[in-house]
C-alpha cells in the first residue's frame, strides 16, 4: 500500500483562526474515507486545503505526486450559475477538460463517453435540457456524471448527499463504490452515519483537531461523537496565539 | 414605393452608408459581449466601464485634440486600469466587486469631465458623451472594423473557459488556471468595444448597442448560441431602423438607434417566447407535464 495524501502538522483556517488544527496522518492510495464531524468541524476546510483553494497556515499537505488536475472536487455548494443557458450535455462534457482543454475537439469517442456517463447517473433523455430545469437531485446526478468523466485519481466530495432523496443518494453511493473498486482514492464529508457504516471502510472524525481516525465502526462511537461536539463549540474571537509550534 | 423609403437614404448618401457599416461592426462584436455581460449579471458593469474610459480619452484629447489614436489609446488604458483596480480591491479587501467598481468609475467620470472642460467646449463634451454616428471618417470605420474582428477572434479563442467561468467558476479553478486570464481578457474586450463604440455613439450610448440587444435576446432564446445570434440580429434591426428614423425625422442618430432597440425590448417583455409576459401571465392554463 502506498500513501496518496499525507498531512503533516497541518493547520488551515480563515483570518488567523484555525479551522483544522495540527492534523497529522496519511490516506492510502485507493482508500475510501468518510470525513465526519459536526458543522464547523473543518471538513470543508480540509478539502479546500487538499484541492489547493486554501493555503495552509502551517504544516503541509503532500499529494504524493498528484497534480491539481488529477483531483476531482465536488464542493458543498457548487457556486454554479444554474440560470446560465447551457444544456445538461454540455455541462457534463466539461468533465473532459483535462483531455480537451481550451481548444481540442470533442470527437465520436468522447461523445460516447459523455453519453455513457449520463446513462450511468440515470439522466438519459435529459441531455438537451437546460441545467436550470433540473431538480436538486438531478443536478447532483449531473455533477456526478461530470466527475465520472474527470477520471481523477483522487476524488473529494463535500457533503454530496445533502438534501437529496434516498433513491438518488443510493444511486450515487453506488457510483462511489465503483470508484473505490477502480482503486481511486475517495474522500467524502458525510453526516449520515448509517451511510458511512454501510459503505465506508475508513472514517476520520474531525472537530478542528482529529478526534478519531480508523475503521469506521471504531470511529463512530457515541463517546467519540460527544467529544467531537464539545470540541467544536470552542471558537473564541479573542483567542490568543497558538503555542504548539513554539513548544 | 415603400422599398425606396427603406433603401434610398443609404443609396443616396455616403454618410448614411458609413453610419450603417459602423453600427453593424459595433453590433457584431458588441452584442455577444453584451450577452456574456448579462449572463454574468454584469449588465450595469458595461455602463460603469463606459464612464471609466472617459478620463483616458480626455487625456488623449487634451494632448492631441480630437485625435482618433490618442483618444482610443487613452480610453483603453483608463478602462483597463479601472477594471483591474476594481478587481484588485475586491480581491484583497472585504469590498465586493460592484461596490469597488462603483467608486472607481464615479471618480473616473468626474476626472474625465474635469479634464475635457479644461480645454474643450460643451460641444466637445457632447461629442464625448453622445458621439457622432453620422460623421464617421475612414480611420474611425477602420478602427470599428478592426475591433470587431479582434473581438470575434478573441471570443472564439476564449469561448470554452469563458463559458465555464460563467457557469461554474469553482470547477474551472479546479481544472485549470485559465480563469483569471480569461476574465481579464474578457474585461479587455468589453473596454475595447466600448472604446470602439465611443467614437460613433459616445460613451453613454456605446453601452446601449451592447446591452439592449442582449437583453432582448434573453426573451427569445434558451441556449447560448441562439441567444447571441438573436442579439446580433436585434442590434442590426435597431441600427438600421434607428438610422432611417433619424434620417426622416431629423433626430440624433445615436439615441434613435437605442430607442429602436428599446422598442424591441418592450415588445420582447410582452411577447417574448422565454419568460415573456403574454405567455406567463396572460395564458392562465398550465401545461400537462
Image: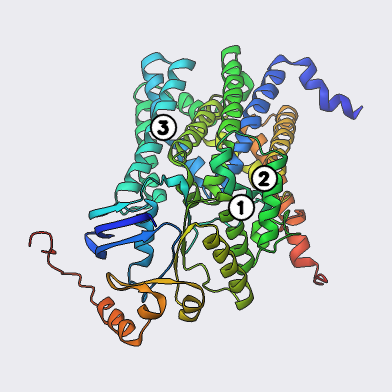
Disc 2 is placed on an element classified as: helix
Q: Residue at x 53, y 71 (%)?
A: A161
Q: Whole-percent x and y of residue B170? A: 47, 52
Dots 2, 1 in contact, CB < 8 A: yes
* Residue A125 sits above or below residue B49 on the image: below
The chain carrying label 3 is B
**Which mark identifies residue B190?**
none
Q: Which dot marks residue A84? A: 1
Marks 2 and 1 on same chain: no
Tell which residue pokes out farthest to the right in this image. Answer: B1
**Image quarter hosting the C terminus of chain A:** bottom left
Count all numbered tags in the image, as a single digit: 3
**3 vs 2, front mark:** 2
B261 or A126: nearer the eye? A126
Coordinates of residue A7 in the picture (x, y in percent): 29, 58
Q: Give the quarter of the image for residue B29.
A: top right
Q: Quadrant of residue B144?
A: top right
Q: Mark 2 — residue?
A: B224
- Looking at this rendering, what residue extends furthest in the bottom direction? A222
Amino acid at each position: 500500500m502506498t500513501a496518496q495524501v499525507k498531512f503533516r502538522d497541518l493547520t488551515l483556517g480563515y483570518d488567523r483562526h484555525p479551522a483544522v488544527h495540527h492534523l497529522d496522518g496519511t490516506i492510502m492510495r485507493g482508500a475510501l474515507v468518510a470525513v465526519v464531524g459536526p458543522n464547523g468541524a473543518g471538513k470543508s476546510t480540509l478539502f479546500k486545503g487538499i484541492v489547493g483553494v486554501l493555503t495552509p497556515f502551517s504544516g503541509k499537505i503532500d499529494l504524493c505526486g498528484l497534480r491539481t488536475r488529477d483531483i476531482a472536487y465536488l464542493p458543498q455548494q457548487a457556486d454554479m450559475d444554474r440560470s446560465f443557458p447551457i444544456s445538461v450535455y454540455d455541462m457534463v462534457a466539461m468533465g473532459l477538460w483535462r483531455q480537451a482543454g481550451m481548444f481540442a475537439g470533442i470527437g465520436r469517442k468522447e461523445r460516447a463517453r459523455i453519453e455513457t456517463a449520463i446513462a450511468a447517473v440515470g439522466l438519459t433523455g435529459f441531455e438537451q435540457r437546460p441545467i436550470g430545469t433540473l431538480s436538486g437531485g438531478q443536478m447532483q446526478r449531473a455533477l456526478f456524471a461530470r466527475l465520472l468523466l474527470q477520471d481523477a485519481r483522487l476524488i473529494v466530495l463535500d457533503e454530496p448527499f445533502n438534501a437529496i432523496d434516498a433513491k438518488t443518494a443510493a444511486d450515487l453511493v453506488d457510483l462511489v463504490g465503483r470508484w473505490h473498486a477502480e482503486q481511486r482514492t475517495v474522500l467524502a464529508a458525510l453526516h449520515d452515519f448509517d451511510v458511512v457504516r454501510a459503505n465506508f471502510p475508513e472514517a476520520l472524525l474531525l472537530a478542528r483537531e482529529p478526534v478519531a481516525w480508523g475503521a469506521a465502526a471504531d470511529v463512530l462511537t457515541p463517546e467519540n461523537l460527544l467529544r467531537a461536539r464539545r470540541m467544536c463549540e470552542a471558537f473564541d474571537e479573542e483567542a490568543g496565539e497558538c503555542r504548539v509550534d513554539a513548544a | 414605393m415603400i422599398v425606396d423609403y427603406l433603401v434610398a437614404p443609404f443609396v443616396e448618401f455616403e454618410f448614411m452608408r458609413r453610419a450603417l457599416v459602423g453600427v453593424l461592426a459595433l453590433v457584431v462584436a458588441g452584442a455577444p459581449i453584451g450577452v456574456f455581460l448579462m449572463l454574468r449579471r454584469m449588465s450595469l458593469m458595461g455602463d460603469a466601464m463606459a464612464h471609466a474610459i472617459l478620463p483616458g480619452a480626455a487625456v488623449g484629447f487634451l494632448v492631441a485634440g480630437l485625435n482618433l489614436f490618442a483618444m482610443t489609446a487613452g480610453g483603453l488604458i483608463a478602462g483597463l486600469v479601472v477594471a483591474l483596480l476594481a478587481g484588485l480591491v475586491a480581491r484583497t479587501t472585504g469590498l465586493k466587486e460592484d461596490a469597488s467598481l462603483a467608486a472607481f468609475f464615479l471618480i473616473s467620470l468626474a476626472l474625465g469631465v474635469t479634464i475635457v472642460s479644461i480645454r474643450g467646449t460643451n460641444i466637445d463634451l457632447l461629442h464625448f458623451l453622445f458621439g457622432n454616428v453620422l460623421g464617421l471618417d475612414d480611420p474611425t470605420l477602420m478602427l470599428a472594423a478592426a475591433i470587431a474582428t479582434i473581438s470575434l477572434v478573441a471570443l472564439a479563442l476564449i469561448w470554452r473557459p469563458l463559458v465555464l467561468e460563467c457557469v461554474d467558476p469553482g470547477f474551472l479553478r479546479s481544472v485549470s488556471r485559465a480563469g483569471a486570464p480569461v476574465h481579464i481578457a474578457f474585461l479587455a474586450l468589453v473596454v475595447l468595444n466600448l472604446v470602439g463604440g465611443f467614437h460613433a455613439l459616445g460613451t453613454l450610448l456605446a453601452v446601449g448597442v451592447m446591452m439592449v440587444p442582449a437583453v432582448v435576446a434573453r426573451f427569445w432564446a434558451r441556449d447560448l448560441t441562439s441567444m447571441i445570434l438573436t442579439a446580433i440580429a436585434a442590434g442590426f434591426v435597431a441600427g438600421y431602423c434607428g438610422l432611417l428614423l433619424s434620417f426622416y425625422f431629423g433626430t440624433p442618430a445615436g439615441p434613435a438607434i437605442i430607442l429602436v432597440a428599446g422598442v424591441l425590448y418592450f415588445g420582447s417583455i410582452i411577447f417574448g417566447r422565454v419568460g415573456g409576459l403574454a405567455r406567463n401571465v396572460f395564458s392562465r392554463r398550465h401545461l400537462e407535464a
